[in-house]
Amino acid sequence: MLNTAASNSGRLTWGACAILGSLLIAGIMSQTSAADKAAAKPEKQLRHVVLYKFKAETTPQQIQEVVDAFSALPGKINTITGFERGTNVSEENKSEGFTHCFVVTFRDIAGRAVYLKHPAHDEYVKVVKDRREKVIVFDYWAEG
């Protein structure tokens, strides 16, 4: 259904060329954007979750020192690819006294290993170890 007048001469009309060109460009763009999405989104990332329940005698200032020290780690350890922190705001009353959460992201196990043995991590542990009553550490692979 290109152009009956042009089909006799074996040539495509301007309109037919425009339609074919548009289809070709659309096909290339859809392939490119799918490839771009795949390249931009890693398959999985290693998440390192740390939850703290502080001792009753730990002051708000001491807790803030812990938060500040932990929050400084991404600037000191280059294998950290993401970092989040927060305090419990759940209304379910199921936190069992755990008040603070830190989530550290790594590309792989090797990145986590660097973090765990890094001198900056060791210094951080010195700040928190006598202030926490309990700690939960939970690592998992987050898949896109």
Image (cartoon, helix red, strand yellow):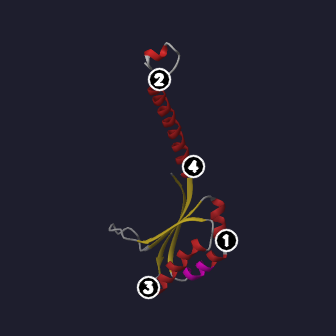
Which of the two labelled residues, at mark 1 and mark 2, occupies the earlier sequence position? 2
Q: Residue at x 49, y 28 (%)?
A: 17
Which of the two labelled residues, at mark 4 and mark 1, occupies the earlier sequence position? 4
Query: Which residue in the protein does label 3 denote?
Result: 60
Element type where label 4 sits in the image: helix
Question: Where residue 131 sits in the image (x, y, percent)?
Answer: 51, 82
Amino acid at the residue labelled 1: Lys
Query: Which residue in the protein does label 2 denote?
Result: 13
Q: Is residue 44 above or below residue 62?
A: above
**Which residues fall within the magenta stretch?**
123-129
Element type where label 1 sits in the image: helix
Q: Quadrant of the N terminus?
A: top left
Element type where label 2 sits in the image: loop
Q: Alpha carbon of mark 4 to alpha carbon of mark 1: how far?
A: 30 Å
Q: Nearer the viewer, mark 4 or mark 2?
A: 2
The residue closer to the viewer here, 104 or 76, is: 76
Image-quadrant location for residue 123: bottom right
Amino acid at the residue labelled 3: Pro
The residue closer to the viewer here, 63 or 30, is: 30
Q: Are marks 3 and 1 in contact (CB under 8 Å)?
A: no
Question: Where residue 135 sits in the image (x, y, percent)?
Answer: 51, 72
Amino acid at the residue labelled 4: Ala
**In screen coordinates, is 93 left or right of 119?**
left
Which of the two labelled residues, at mark 2 and mark 3, occupies the earlier sequence position? 2
Query: Which residue in the protein does label 1 denote?
Result: 117
Query: Which residue in the protein does label 4 denote?
Result: 39
